[in-house]
Structures are given as structure tokens and as C-alpha cells.
Image: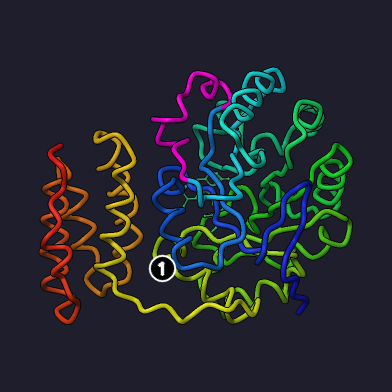
């Protein structure tokens, strides 16, 4: 297994080469801050941002764009369907001080595909070629793309496709190791990344179901990738990147002391940087995943999910912790009062 302690792409460095994945509704300033607090993350992302809507967004209040100083380097991901959308979108990203730009070529969500974006682009090589060429011409920022393994297990197509991406000026490629139609229930095909890696000279990041040190080791061995991207597991266990950084990349990080209610409170406090009406939805999304740390976590997820305001969700969560985490020190949670919403 080959382990690179860092990767460089364009003007950026990711050390260690561990990336927090873009996830709609989940990857925002509060999650990034929580993951950063444990350490081990070398590169951050935003969720996908509509290229068409981006020019109208306000970076001070948009929950997609709000960001604090320590969230660096931060790659903004574009959901784009046509090269003509790029000039205003990239201009906006320059104003928003993005550190790099990622093109979403892998999202299989039906609404995204119907709009002509995400993984549907992988079926239209010419359009992708124009998009990457145009993006490259419009920005000096590091440019990356995130793909799936395509629609058919035809390795020739995929190898030519990724070589085209590099030839058009891409600096970094992330591969979610599933075919476009495959669900998360199916084991990832990490080994399909290795031949792509062989054909490219830019760094390749492997993604898909990396949820532990063991899985990270297995993925690196099978994929030969230069780094790893982690999504859902970082919401369930925001310290998982730190564990992988320590065990695989030799990062000098203390073993985290895990106090789940305290981690939940830290996430909730970070939500205060969003407008009040944007907080509850994000708490619900986060809780869906974080609740998996408890054997009866579905009760936490459901009490938060059914709440109509933030105060109700918070009360339900604290009550859940009281019953299910009796050894935890809940005093800080009991002292904290959510702002009126
Ligand atoms: C709720 C959710 C939202 C997602 N949104 C995005 C997105 O905005 N852009 C993207 O490229 N991938 C998106 N993904 C895919 C993830 O980035 C990642 O490829 C996938 O979850 C597999 O990695 P994991 O097993 O580490 O979670 C999303 C995944 C989830 C679960």
C-alpha cells in the first residue's frame, strides 16, 4: 500500500490527503468546523452549488457559502449543465474567495440528471470536454472533478474519459467507486480506480464507503489512490478523519475523547452562524446520521425530525441524551438555551 503524506494540485496542498466530501444539506460551515476540530482533514468542500443561481447568492448569509477563517482550503463544487453557465458562476466564486473549484460530474440524483447535470454529463463526453476547457480558461484556481465509474463496466471508456479530463486542464480527480446506477447498499468497486490512476499524472482521490481505519487501508490498497474522500462516516463520526490521519498518515493527533452529547452541542453552536430559519433543517439532516452512534438512535432522529422549531428539537435531543447516555456530563447542554426561533 502506497501512502502519500500530502498531495499538491495547482497552488494547493492537502496534508494529509483526506478530503471531506460534498454532501447536499450536510457539508456546510458547521460540519466542516466540527470535523476540523478533531483534525486530520486536509481538504474541505462545499455541497454542490447551482452554477445558475450562484451569481445571485450573498456569501455573508447564504448557508451554502457562509464560511469561517479556519475552513481552508475549501473547494467550492459546481453543479453545471452547460459551459455557458460558467463565466458568471466562476466570476462569483472568485468574489467568494473559493480556494478551488470542483465540477460535479457524478451526482446520480434524478432531479440533477434531468436538469442535465451530475452523472448525466458522463454520458456526453463532448459537453464535458467543453465545460472543463471553458472552466480552465476562466480560472487560475485549482480545478477538480468528481465522477462515478460511469454507466457500464467498460474500462476503456472510463480511462479515455479521465485522460480527456486531465488533457483539458484538470488538477485533481475524485472517483466515487460505484457505477452511476448503483446504490450505497452495493459494496464499492475501489479496485476499478487503480487503472485510472495508472493513466493519469494528476492526483486521484478514492471515495465510497470509507468509514474506518480498516476500510481506509483496504481502499488505499485496492485503488492505489493518492488520497481518500470521506462523506457519510464523517457525519456519523466527525473524528473518523482524525483516526485515519493518525493511524495511516502518522499525524501527530491525540486520540479524541468522545463525548457524543458534547459533540452534538458543538455542532448546534456552530449552526448559530446561519440565519434562524436555516438551522432546523440542517440539524435534522445532521441528526439522521449522528444518531447512528446510539443503539436506539432512531428515537433521537425521529424526535428531531418531527420538531417544528429548534427549541423543540433541542429539548427532545437533550431528553434523549439523558435517557441514553447517562454517564455523559449533560450540564453544558442543560445550561444552553436555543435562541427564540
Ligand atoms: C446526503 C448526500 C448528499 C450528497 N451530495 C453530494 C453533492 O452535493 N455533490 C457530490 O459530488 N456528491 C454528493 N454526495 C455523494 C458524496 O459526496 C459521496 O460521493 C458518497 O456519499 C459516497 O461517499 P461516502 O460513502 O463516504 O459517503 C452526496 C451524498 C449524500 C449521502
Residue 262 falls in image quadrant: bottom left
**Can you give x and y, in whole percent of width and height, for residue 291 in the image?**
29, 64
Taking the spot 86% from the left edge, 52% from the top edge, the residue there is 156
**Can you give x and y, in whole percent of width and height, for residue 129 in the image?**
81, 32
Q: Magenta part of the protein: which range?
A: 51-68
Residue 253 part of the magenta segment: no
Does the magenta stretch mainly form a helix, a strand or a loop?
loop
**Can you give x and y, in whole percent of width and height, for residue 246 in the image?**
57, 78
Residue 67 part of the magenta segment: yes
Q: Is residue 153 above or below residue 97?
A: below
Taking the spot 58% from the left edge, 42% from the top edge, the residue there is 107
Q: Quadrant of the C terminus?
A: top left
**Can you give x and y, in whole percent of width and height, for residue 209 in the image?**
54, 65
Q: Is residue 282 above or below residue 16?
A: above
Q: Is residue 306 above or below residue 265?
A: above
- Which element type, helix, strand or loop, lies under badge 1? loop
Judging by the rendered image, the residue that carries numbered circle 1 is: 237
Q: Nearer the viewer, residue 333 or 213?
A: 333
Relative horizontal placement of residue 154, taking residue 267 as reference (left or right): right
Amino acid at each position: 500500500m502506497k501512502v502519500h503524506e500530502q498531495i499538491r494540485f495547482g497552488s494547493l496542498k492537502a496534508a494529509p490527503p483526506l478530503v471531506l466530501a460534498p454532501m447536499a444539506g450536510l457539508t456546510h460551515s458547521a460540519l466542516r468546523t466540527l470535523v476540523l476540530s478533531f483534525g486530520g482533514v486536509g481538504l474541505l468542500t462545499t455541497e454542490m452549488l447551482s452554477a445558475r443561481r450562484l451569481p445571485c447568492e450573498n456569501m455573508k448569509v447564504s448557508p451554502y457559502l457562509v464560511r469561517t477563517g479556519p475552513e481552508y482550503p475549501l473547494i467550492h463544487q459546481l453543479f453545471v449543465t452547460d459551459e455557458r453557465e460558467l463565466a458568471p458562476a466562476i466570476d462569483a466564486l472568485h468574489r467568494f474567495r473559493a480556494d478551488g473549484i470542483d465540477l460535479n460530474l457524478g451526482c446520480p440524483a434524478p432531479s440533477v440528471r434531468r436538469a442535465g447535470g451530475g452523472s448525466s454529463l458522463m454520458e456526453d463526453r463532448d459537453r464535458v470536454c467543453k465545460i472543463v476547457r471553458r472552466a480552465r480558461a476562466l480560472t487560475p484556481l485549482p480545478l477538480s472533478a468528481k465522477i462515478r465509474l460511469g454507466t457500464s463496466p467498460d474500462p476503456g471508456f472510463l480511462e479515455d474519459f479521465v485522460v480527456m479530463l486531465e488533457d483539458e486542464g484538470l488538477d485533481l480527480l475524485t472517483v466515487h467507486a460505484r457505477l452511476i446506477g448503483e446504490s450505497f447498499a452495493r459494496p464499492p468497486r475501489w479496485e476499478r480506480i487503480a487503472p485510472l490512476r495508472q493513466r493519469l499524472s494528476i492526483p486521484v482521490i478514492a471515495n465510497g464507503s470509507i468509514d474506518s481505519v480498516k476500510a481506509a487501508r483496504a481502499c488505499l490498497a485496492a485503488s492505489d489512490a493518492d488520497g481518500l474522500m470521506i462523506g457519510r462516516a464523517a457525519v456519523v463520526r466527525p473524528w473518523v478523519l482524525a483516526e485515519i490521519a493518525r493511524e495511516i498518515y502518522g499525524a501527530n493527533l491525540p486520540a479524541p475523547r468522545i463525548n457524543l452529547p458534547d459533540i452534538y452541542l458543538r455542532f448546534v453552536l456552530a449552526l448559530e452562524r446561519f440565519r434562524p430559519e436555516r438551522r432546523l433543517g440542517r440539524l435534522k439532516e445532521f441528526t439522521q446520521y449522528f444518531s447512528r452512534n446510539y443503539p436506539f438512535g432512531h428515537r433521537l432522529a425521529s424526535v428531531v425530525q418531527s420538531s417544528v422549531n429548534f427549541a423543540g428539537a433541542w429539548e427532545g435531543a437533550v431528553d434523549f441524551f439523558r435517557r441514553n447516555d447517562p454517564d455523559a456530563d449533560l450540564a453544558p447542554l442543560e445550561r444552553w438555551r436555543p435562541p427564540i426561533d
